[in-house]
Image (cartoon, helix red, strand yellow):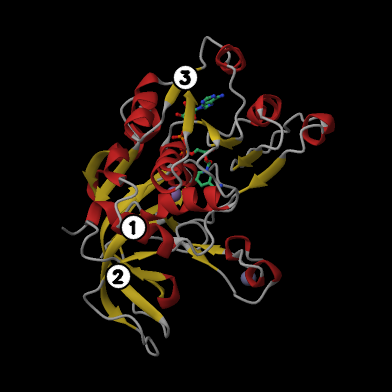
Amino acid sequence: MESIVIQQPNNLWIEQRPLPLPEPGEVRIKVKIAGICGSDSHIYRGHNPFAQYPRVIGHEFYGIIDAVGDGVRNKSPGERVVVDPVISCGVCYPCTVGKPNVCTSLTVLGVHRDGGFSEYVTVPESNVYCIPDSVSDRQAVMVEPFTIAANVTGQVAPTKNDIALIYGAGPMGLTTVQVLKGVYQVKTVIVVDRINARLAMAKACGADETMNNTRRPLAQYLAEKGIRPTLIIDAACHPAILTEAIDLASPAARIVIMGFSSAPSQIIQQGITGKELTIFSSRLNAHKFPVVIEWMQKKLIDPEKLITQQFDYRQVIDAITLFETDQQRCCKVLLSFSV
Ligand code: NAI
Ligand code: MN
Ligand code: ZN
């Protein structure tokens, strides 16, 4: 089989590897489509501190089970499936309080263990979720990115009366817009970004208002409209955004951060306590695959609106390069394996 391997930072090649045999409790999947994520690019470029090399990247993928290991009871060859990349122990403190996404021995497919940019991949049966017939292949490959939005929104119990502000109209911001509008029917969702093409995608995903903060400060825009957001989600993740979000938030608002910057954010206690704000963080997803598959089945979200390109996997370098360099044209870029 062929696998996309990052040998060392900035050194990607397609390697011939022997077809892996599923271990006990594992299934083997023939990958059909995979999605490129910012974190794949970070591993490729050597910007992910958790990555070990050589590594087969890819944690967003859809395929068909083609073999099962000993002891696999609930999955069979021929089933259409997606895979939760979060592999957890089930017994540590975070696992026992429902946060396997921050398991003390967390393993993430495509980061700590070989992932899905490969013609075949073996994964634990317990991470595999079947896809109903009503969900297409291209929708299925988008389950994982939507689980991030499910996790983010799951922290804050959005209501119809919320006025939500989302920073960033990349894949993370756009999945969050769709979930806030389609699932939670939040009254007002405002999206801020620096790229007009992405703000247009935010509108298509259901945003009520969009704002380009390149030249005009967001604070001024909101003040003119008399808007104080009750829910703020930072899907752009510059460290300065938390400072601004605390300032702009309504009293009693909730803020969710999801960035991994190691640079400090300047925050003032009074700004938080004076309004009794609640600040959440969100990492990966905690058992959100079934939730998102149900949303897709009920057509509450529309993943096709995020997909901008699809390449053959042999063109992976072109695909990742375009993804990295052209945020005007690219949002979610897919790789086709077998079709
Ligand atoms: P992306 O780079 O495609 O999108 C970010 C968007 O934010 C861009 O459109 C950019 O123009 C905009 N932006 C940047 N600075 C801004 C500012 N000051 N004001 C307004 N807009 C601004 O990235 P993607 O894939 O959507 O991911 C977003 C962030 O979420 C990344 O930082 C990524 O590391 C993080 N992330 C976190 C996850 C988690 O589980 N916590 C999972 C996936 C991504
Ligand atoms: Mn991803
Ligand atoms: Zn654990």
Find numbered disc 3 in the image and state the secondary structure of the residue it sits on: strand
Q: CA distance from mark 1 to mark 3?
A: 33 Å
Residue at the spot 67% in from the left edge and 66% down from the top edge: 94
Q: Position of residue 223 (x, y in %)?
A: 61, 14
Is residue 150 or residue 263 the one in the foreground? 150
Q: Are marks 1 and 2 in contact (CB under 8 Å)?
A: yes
On screen, residue 233 above or below 50: above
Q: Residues within 10 Å of mark 1 (few under 14, many from 20)?
A: many
Locate the C terminus by quadrant. Answer: bottom left
Is residue 50 or residue 72 the one in the foreground? 72
Query: At label 1, which amino acid type do we have?
Result: Phe
Residue at the spot 46% in from the left edge and 42% down from the top edge: 180
Residue underneath mark 3: 211
> Which quadrant holds residue 52?
bottom right
Q: Position of residue 319 (x, y in %)?
A: 30, 39
Q: Is residue 262 rendered to the left or right of residue 333?
A: right
Find numbered disc 2 in the image and state the secondary structure of the residue it sits on: strand
The single residue placed furthest to the left in the displayed view is 339
Is residue 257 or residue 24 the one in the foreground? 257
* Residue 57 visible in the current orientation: no
Residue at the spot 65% in from the left edge and 72% down from the top edge: 96
The single residue placed furthest to the right in the displayed view is 270
Q: CA distance from mark 1 to mark 2?
A: 10 Å
Q: CA distance from mark 2 to mark 3?
A: 42 Å
Residue underneath mark 2: 29
Is residue 319 or residue 193 the one in the foreground? 193
Q: Nearer the viewer, mark 2 or mark 3?
A: 3
> Which quadrant holds residue 170?
top left
> Residue 61, labelled with which disc?
1
